[in-house]
Image: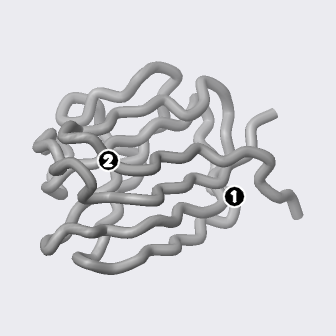
Amino acid sequence: MSFPNTVARLVSAANSNNATLVSNQRTKLWRVTGYNAAAAVRYIKLFNLRVLPAPGTDTPFVTISLAPSAAFNIPFDGLTFQTGLGYGLVTGSADSDNTAVTAADIVGLNLFYESP
């Protein structure tokens, strides 16, 4: 069994979709942790891309709802992103949603991953 050798961190979400390219190569995702400080559900969209994702335009590989006012600790057990790994944080679940989260809606976001 492999274990993550890298952590991508976001201390506090900005007032945007927080689009981030974590890795531009084959990547295994092991776990996502953090806290949704908003009083409503927020979504993290994970993208299998080699370039900066464009939430609302690019189709997510995985979309995860984050319960309001709650911590999250989501195991992925080495889910492979063949092309690369990126993410965005938005307020809606639809693939076409690109509605920005409010600043500090998501805090302490950590993606534990492994790249060759």
Please determine whether, in this image, residue 57 is positioned above or below residue 79. Answer: above
State the colouring used for the structure image: one colour
Q: Residue at x 52, y 74 (%)?
A: 73
Q: Residues within 10 Å of mark 2 (few under 14, many from 20)?
A: many
Type of amino acid under label 1: Gly
Q: Residue at x 73, y 45 (%)?
A: 6
Position of the C terminus, as image quadrant, is top right
Q: Residue at x 62, y 36 (%)?
A: 82
Q: Which residue is mark 2?
A: 13
Q: Is residue 104 left or right of residue 61?
A: left
Measure the C-alpha gap from mark 1 to mark 2.
25 Å
Viewer-nearest residue: 44 or 96: 44
Q: Residue at x 46, y 65 (%)?
A: 34
Quarter holding residue 97: top left
Q: Residue furthest top?
A: 51
**Which SS class for mark 2?**
loop
Counting from the top left corner in percent of width and height, residue 54 is at: 28, 27
Quarter holding residue 110: bottom right
Viewer-nearest residue: 80 or 67: 67
**Which SS class for mark 1?**
strand
Q: Are marks 1 and 2 in contact (CB under 8 Å)?
A: no
Type of amino acid under label 2: Ala
Viewer-nearest residue: 66 or 29: 66
Counting from the top left corner in percent of width and height, residue 112 is at: 65, 54
Q: Mark number for residue 78?
A: 1
Counting from the top left corner in percent of width and height, residue 13 is at: 32, 47
Q: Mark number for residue 65?
A: none
Counting from the top left corner in percent of width and height, residue 115 is at: 75, 37
Q: Is residue 48 left or right of residue 14?
A: right
